Image: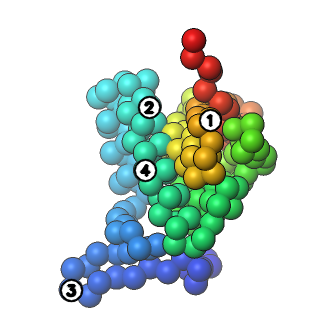
């Protein structure tokens, strides 16, 4: 087992017990606890409805996080997106690898290795990592907006390590279809 990376400091307030990383309050829970709750909500709402809700919430949260981190560290463009992938990878969700990114075109391809969902749920035959999808469009759109672009994107999961014959997940980000 490796020790915590010093570049991802976790501070614990001795009075309140609040954990903080990157100046944000954090919750530290066992993976099975989080995923069991995730599955319970999915069963109650249906996977499609739950995926829609998580997409919107994840998009908003990713945009906010990237905006704050860009300001804090003086990052811009692809650097912001890459920083976000690094931090997600350091927090136990899985390892997120940006295989390609083109801000001008509004496209990206992200590979997900060691997904927490796949580790917990196994080979379900479904795309179990949909919770992450909105995160990629939110991060991309924040980087685009910060450089003055009005281009906005949508992300989708195209493969999951939980599917038969697949070892990793893939997500693609692409421009929203032009209206009108």
Q: Which disc, if any, is residue 160? A: none
- Counting residues from the start of the chain, the first of labels 1 and 2 encountered is 2
- Counting residues from the start of the chain, the first of labels 4 and 3 encountered is 3
| Disc 3 to disc 2, C-alpha distance | 37 Å
User: Dot 4: what SS?
Assistant: helix
Q: Which residue carries the number 2 mark?
A: 51
Q: Which disc, if any, is residue 15? A: 3
User: Residue 9 at x, y = what percent?
Assistant: 50, 80
User: Which numbered mark, 1 or 3, is in the foreground of this view?
Assistant: 1
- Counting residues from the start of the chain, the first of labels 4 and 2 encountered is 2
Q: Residue at x 39, y 69 (%)?
A: 24
User: Dot 2: what SS?
Assistant: helix
User: Residue 93 at x, y = what percent?
Assistant: 54, 56
Query: Outermost residue toward the bottom?
Result: 14
- Counting residues from the start of the chain, the first of labels 3 and 2 encountered is 3
- For label 3, count other residues whose C-alpha is less than 10 Å away and answer few (under 14), some (14-19) or many (20+): few
Query: Outermost residue toward the top?
Result: 180
User: Dot 3: what SS?
Assistant: loop
User: Which numbered mark, 1 or 2, is in the foreground of this view?
Assistant: 1
Q: Which residue carries the number 1 mark?
A: 151
Observer able to see residue 157: no
């Amino acid at each position: 087992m490796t020790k915590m990376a010093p570049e991802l400091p976790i501070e614990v307030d001795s009075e309140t017990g609040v954990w903080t990383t990157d100046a944000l309050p954090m919750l530290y829970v066992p993976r099975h606890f989080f995923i069991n709750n995730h599955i319970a909500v999915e069963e109650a709402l249906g996977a499609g409805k739950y995926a829609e809700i998580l997409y919107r919430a994840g998009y908003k949260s990713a945009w906010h996080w990237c905006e704050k981190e860009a300001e804090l560290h003086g990052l811009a463009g692809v650097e912001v997106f890459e920083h976000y992938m690094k931090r997600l990878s350091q927090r136990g969700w899985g390892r997120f690898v940006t295989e390609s990114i083109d801000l001008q075109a509004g496209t990206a391809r992200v590979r997900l290795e060691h997904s927490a969902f796949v580790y917990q749920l196994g080979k379900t035959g479904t795309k179990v990592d949909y919770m992450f999808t909105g995160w990629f469009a939110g991060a991309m759109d924040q980087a685009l907006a910060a450089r003055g672009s009005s281009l906005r994107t949508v992300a989708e999961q195209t493969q999951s390590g939980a599917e038969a014959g697949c070892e990793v997940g893939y997500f693609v980000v692409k421009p929203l279809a032009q209206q009108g």
